[in-house]
Amino acid sequence: MSIIEALEKLAELNNYEEISVKLKDDDEPTPIDFEIDDLRKFAEDPDQKFDLIVTEYTIRELDENGKEKLGEPLYTVVK
């Protein structure tokens, strides 16, 4: 799935509440709608597919065996 699809799924899992997300390398949380809009506008390939797992609280990458990669998640929910 693309990062945009993963963020949309994250919003769905949080009942479309006004949540913010924190990118793993970012200090400041961003409202999820702004993050999705920014990706649509500025990403080189917004439809690029990744192996991702989405939970209510995070978006994480999967390794080649389908297991969650160790380390920080790509995105974390900040309510």
Image: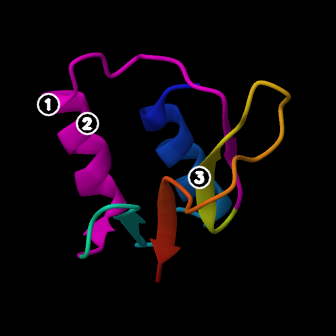
Residue 24 x, y percent position in the rendering:
40, 61
Residue type indicated by callout 1: Phe
> As drawn, is 56 to the left or to the right of 50?
right
Disc 1: which residue = 42
CA–CA distance between discs 3 and 2?
15 Å
As drawn, the label of residue 32 is: none
Residue type indicated by callout 3: Ile
Location of residue 49 with respect to 41 vertically, above or below:
above
Disc 2: which residue = 39
Residue at 31% x, 54% y is 33
CA–CA distance between discs 2 and 1?
5 Å
**Can residue 47 be found in the magenta stretch?**
yes
Name the residue at the bottom extreme.
79
* Element class at badge 1: helix
Disc 3: which residue = 59
Residue 76 x, y percent position in the rendering:
51, 67
Identify the image quadrant of the N terminus.
Answer: top right
* Element class at badge 3: strand
